[in-house]
Image (tube, coloured by chain):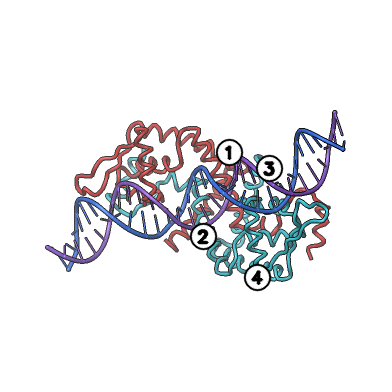
Chain colours: A red, B cyan, C purple, D blue
Amino acid sequence: MTRAEAMDVPHDGPPRTPDRLRRLASRLLSQLTTRSDRLINEGLARADARKWHYAVLASLQEYGPGSQAALSGRTGIYRSDMVGVLNELAERGLVERAPDPDDRRRNTITISPRGRRRLRRLDTVLDELHDELLAPLSPAERDELVRLLTRLLDHHTRTSS
Amino acid sequence: MTRAEAMDVPHDGPPRTPDRLRRLASRLLSQLTTRSDRLINEGLARADARKWHYAVLASLQEYGPGSQAALSGRTGIYRSDMVGVLNELAERGLVERAPDPDDRRRNTITISPRGRRRLRRLDTVLDELHDELLAPLSPAERDELVRLLTRLLDHHTRTSS
DNA sequence: CGATTGCGTTAGTCCGACTAACGATGTACG
DNA sequence: CGTACATCGTTAGTCGGACTAACGCAATCG
């Protein structure tokens, strides 16, 4: 059945990926994400940052101070992991953690001036990295990709979360 | 700058995700992939399979028998992890592992008739799962998505691998 | 008041990608 | 020929991300 196709790859040839796999959207997603994550993580590491840092700073900048739980909701970072992220941000003076006077169970997290500067810096770092990530696509195609991904993600978050 | 936007969410409102994050292609990819992986893994688990099984079976079907190293190359599974996958497949009688007479360092892996049946079954399982995954998109959009992802993946595999 | 709920935190699980090292074999070359 | 080097299968283990369990403590509800 597929015996004929085998002729395309005489004996040992380049180890090509089966067609069935290459067409699989789920596989394309995870393979690409692996590469994308590596690219982004390495890029951010070079700037002494991690993507969680960016997520938290952006969230604080756009929606103002909030409790750790609130940040968790906005960023998608699990509250269990939030502790560590905030520790890292606080160490670097990008964020301030103060007890909330209204509800002493929670901390109020505030972005510092240095945090704002940091955020701006990370914005450009991420821009460059995404330029690399999306290099083969035209601006229109990049938009289209983002549009499609957004629709899928929205669907799967509303439908099961 | 983003001070104005804060007005959209008065005091505590629904924990909405910052714009900066929602537009980030890398973030869309990893979030979506998390969901996609979960969907696929659970679906395959219900059929007593894992995606690696499918990858190996498909590779054997399309390119014929091969050494573990060859399968590693075709499927993208690390050779370290290959052992376990092949054990699982062999346990289920989907695959046969025989020493290669020409080179006694390697095993030749062959798909069994049962493996072929299995592959056909998994084909339809995956079809259904992808229908769920891509539900919000029209057929044309699904194609477009696959096209875009493929181009990106190809670019990043040729360019750094 | 007591029961329940929400918050921050610690610890730890699970899974996928990936590295290191090893024994057994095969290949190249002085 | 022999020795150095490469390859294959395998084991063990690292690392990062997503996620669960449980706890103490403060607030809130009935």
Label drawn at residue A132: 1
At mark 4, the secondary structure is helix
Discs 3, 2 touching: Cβ within 8 Å: no
For the residues beneath circles 3 and 2, the answer to whether they share a chain is: yes
| Label 3 Cα crowd, 10 Å radius (few <14 / some 14-19 / many 20+) | few
Pointers 4 and 3 in contact (C-beta within 8 Å): no
Q: Nearer the viewer, residue D19 or A118?
A: D19
Classify residue C4 by image quadrant. Answer: bottom left
Please name the residue that numbered disc 2 is placed on: B38
Q: Is label 4 or label 1 in front? A: 4
Tell me the kind of residue under disc 2: Arg
**Disc 3 or disc 2, which is closer to the eye?**
2
Identify residue type, mark 1.
Glu
Tell me the number on the disc at residue B158: 3
Label whose residue precedes the other's in the sequence (4 or 3): 4
Q: Earlier in the sequence, mark 3 or mark 2?
A: 2
Q: Amino acid at mark 3?
A: Arg
Q: Which mark is residue A6?
A: none
Q: Residues within 10 Å of mark 2 (few under 14, many from 20)?
A: few
| Alpha-carbon span between mark 4 and mark 2 | 20 Å
Residue B130 appears left or right of B70:
left
| Residue contact at pointers 2 and 1, CB within 8 angstroms | no
Kindly indicate whether the residue at mark 3 contacts the one at mark 1 (C-beta within 8 angstroms).
no
The chain letter for the residue carrying disc 2 is B
Report how many numbered discs are placed on residues in the image: 4
Quadrant for residue A121, please give it.
Answer: top left
Residue in front for this viewpoint, B71 or A21: B71
Amino acid type, label 4:
Arg
- Chain under label 1? A
Q: Can you see residue B155?
A: no
